[in-house]
Image (cartoon, coloured by chain):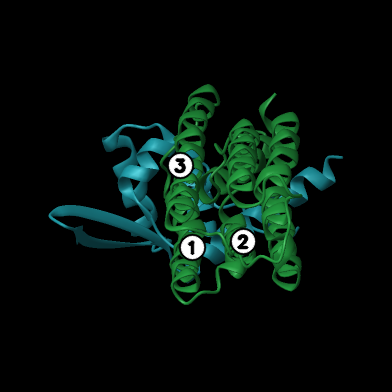
Chain colours: A cyan, B green
Amino acid sequence: MKGTYDKAFENVIRLKVMSILMVNEQYDFNSFKELLEVTDGNLASHLRNLENQAYIRVEKSFVGRKPMTSYMATHEGKKAFQAHLAFLENLINENK
Amino acid sequence: MKDPKQDLAEIKSMMERSSRFLSLSGMSGVLAGFYALIGATMAYYWLYFPNPPFGDGQFSHLGGGILTNLILTGLVVLSLSIVTAWILSEKKSKRTSNQLWTPAGKRFIQSLFFPVTIGGLFCFALLHQGFSIFIPSTMLIFYGLGLLNASHFTLNDIKYLGYGQAILGIIASFFPAYGLVIWALGFGVLHIIYGSMMYLKYDK
């Protein structure tokens, strides 16, 4: 069977985070929070989880005086996501 | 494991909502078109009335008063359109419970207004150098290119509006005598057609 089911994307928040980072070069913490409608703590723990697996990369910077934390997908993260996506698609095709 | 179809639907929805500004209201396009038509009618009265709305385009009687009126009218039409788009888009984003100011929204505004601002400055240069007959075509061309540029960050349909404006702009540059009429076609009629199509397709 093509594709690999990735446990990292079993959680729907992590799945959504990765989907966003596939089409945006970078995305910041507050925008994630607004779009996903999750609490700070919940989002931070999922982001840390993805970061620990080296699927995403963090960049901290300042906009004026406000700190901004941006995230981007790593090469491995993108590959893992594509494999996961292929798995899901295959699963659907087989069950047709 | 959950339903893979649901997962795929989530992925698709997140990709769209995070990268495209989806709250742009169709009705605001219709209203912008009406403002433009009213503005163009006023310009017609100042420039050509009681003759038909085209001429040699040299505006021989373009006194300082008329020029100020034209510029003011243009600015009022522009501001009214922006304010209308803002208010109606805010309403739409509340109704669809999307955020209005996403990173995609900011990119949409930037990619539209950079070409439009450059075009606006270029129009002032044309006016200053005595090439005012090319102002309607320049406005249409730069606005059309701005829309094409911005179409990557909103519903893709807007690119057809962009093609329409840019093509009308090129036509107007070859027939500057018809500049005002073609301007009204682009900023007025095309906006109304596009706005009502978007309204029927997405907002109803």
Residue that sits furthest to the bottom in the current view: B129
Residue B46 in picture, x, y percent from top left:
58, 47
- Pointer 1 chain: A
Circle nearer the viewer, 1 or 3: 3
Q: Secondary structure at mark 1?
A: helix
Residue B61 in picture, x, y percent from top left:
56, 59
Q: Few, some or many C-alpha atoms within 10 Å of disc 2 (few <14, some 14-19, many ≥20)?
A: many
- What amino acid type is highlighted by mark number 2? Pro
Q: Residue at x 76, y 67 (%)?
A: B171
- Residue B92 position by quadrant: top right
- Pointer 3 chain: B
Q: Which residue is mark 3?
A: B76
- CB under 8 Å between discs 1 and 3: no
Q: Are marks 1 and 3 on the same chain?
A: no
Q: Are marks 2 and 1 on the same chain?
A: no
Which is nearer the eye, B141 or B62?
A: B62
Q: Which residue is mark 2?
A: B136
Q: Few, some or many C-alpha atoms within 10 Å of disc 1 (few <14, some 14-19, many ≥20)?
A: many
Q: Is residue B31 left or right of residue B89?
A: right
Q: Secondary structure at mark 3?
A: helix
Residue B178 in picture, x, y percent from top left:
74, 60
- CB under 8 Å between discs 2 and 3: no
Residue that sits furthest to the left in the current view: A65
Q: Few, some or many C-alpha atoms within 10 Å of disc 3 (few <14, some 14-19, many ≥20)?
A: some
- Pointer 2 chain: B
Q: Which residue is mark 1?
A: A77
Which is nearer the eye, B40 or B10?
A: B40
